[in-house]
C-alpha cells in the first residue's frame, strides 16, 4: 500500500513539473508575440491588436472573456500577463505569420498542455512524464529557435532544468534541450 502512495506522490510531482514547464512555454510564446509586434512596427500591444481586431473577434467566436482580455476598452490597456497559453496562441496564429515549423510546434505545445491540464487526476507515471518532457523539449526548441535573444534562451533553459531536477542549474540551452 505504501508503494501506491509513493507512486501517487511521484505522479503528482511529475504532473506539477510539467505544469511548471508549460508556464515557461507560455513565457516563450509571449516573447514570440512581442518579437512579432516589434517586427510589424507597432509601438504597443493595443495598436497591434487593433490592426487584427476583426479577425481575432471572429476567431474567438463571441468568447466575451477572452475578447475582454484583448480589448478591455479605454482607458484600460490589454495586459498580456493575464493571458493563458490558449489566448496567446490564438493571437500568434492569427496575427504573426509564423513559419510552418513554429506554427506546428505551437499547435503541438498547446495541444499537449491542454491534455495535461485537463486530466481527471493530476498524476503522471514516470514513463508518461518522460514522454511529455521529451515532446516539451522538442516543441520549445523549435519555438526558441525563432527567438534570437541568447540571454532569454539561456534563462528559459536554466529554469526548465531547475524545474525538472528540482535544484538550481547552470546550464545552457544546448545542454538542456539535447
Image: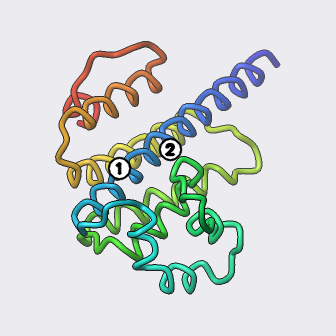
Disc 1 secondary structure class: helix
Q: Is residue 4 left or right of residue 37?
A: right
From what the image shows, is residue 51 above or below residue 154?
Answer: below
Q: Which residue is mark 1?
A: 31
Label 1 crowding class (10 Å Cα cut-off): few <14, some 14-19, many 20+? Answer: some
Report the colour scheme. rainbow
Q: CA distance from mark 1 to mark 2?
A: 14 Å
Q: Tell me residue 43's x, y (percent).
A: 31, 61
Quarter of the image for residue 175 reads: top left
Nearest the eye: 120 or 101: 101
Q: Quadrant of the N terminus?
A: top right
Q: Is residue 61 left or right of residue 3?
A: left
Camera-nearest residue between 98 and 56: 56
Would residue 150 appear left or right of 115 to someone viewing this image? left
56 lies above or below 4: below
Q: Position of residue 15 (x, y in %)?
A: 61, 36
Is residue 128 placed above or below 171 in the rendered structure? below
Q: Residue at x 42, y 21 (%)?
A: 162
Q: Vertical placement of 29 versus 20: above or below?
A: below
**Mark sitting earlier along the chain (1/2):** 2
Q: Do the numbered discs 1 and 2 sit on residues whose CB atoms are within 8 Å?
A: no
The extreme front residue here reads: 75
Judge by depth and name the residue closer to the eye, 153 or 67. 67
Mark 2 nearby-residue class (10 Å; few <14, some 14–19, many ≥20): many
Residue receiving disc 2: 22
Q: At 29% across and 62% down in the image, what residue appears?
A: 36
Residue at x-position 60% and y-position 59%: 76
Q: Under tag 2, what secondary structure?
A: helix
Q: Residue at x 48, y 84 (%)?
A: 55
Amino acid at each position: 500500500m505504501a508503494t501506491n502512495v509513493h507512486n501517487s506522490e511521484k505522479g503528482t510531482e511529475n504532473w506539477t513539473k510539467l505544469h511548471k514547464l508549460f508556464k515557461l512555454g507560455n513565457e516563450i510564446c509571449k516573447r514570440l508575440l512581442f518579437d512579432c509586434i516589434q517586427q510589424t512596427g507597432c509601438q504597443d500591444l493595443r495598436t497591434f491588436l487593433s490592426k487584427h481586431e476583426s479577425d481575432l473577434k471572429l476567431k474567438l467566436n463571441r468568447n466575451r472573456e477572452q475578447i475582454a482580455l484583448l480589448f478591455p476598452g479605454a482607458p484600460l490597456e490589454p495586459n498580456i500577463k493575464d493571458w493563458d497559453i490558449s489566448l496567446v496562441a490564438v493571437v500568434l496564429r492569427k496575427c504573426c505569420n509564423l513559419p510552418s515549423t513554429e506554427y506546428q510546434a505551437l499547435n503541438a505545445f498547446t495541444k499537449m498542455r491542454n491534455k495535461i491540464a485537463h486530466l481527471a487526476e493530476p498524476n503522471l507515471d514516470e514513463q508518461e512524464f518522460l514522454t511529455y518532457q521529451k515532446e516539451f523539449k522538442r516543441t520549445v526548441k523549435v519555438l526558441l529557435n525563432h527567438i534570437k535573444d541568447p540571454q532569454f534562451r539561456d534563462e528559459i533553459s536554466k529554469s526548465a532544468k531547475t524545474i525538472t531536477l528540482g535544484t538550481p542549474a547552470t546550464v545552457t540551452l544546448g545542454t538542456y534541450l539535447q
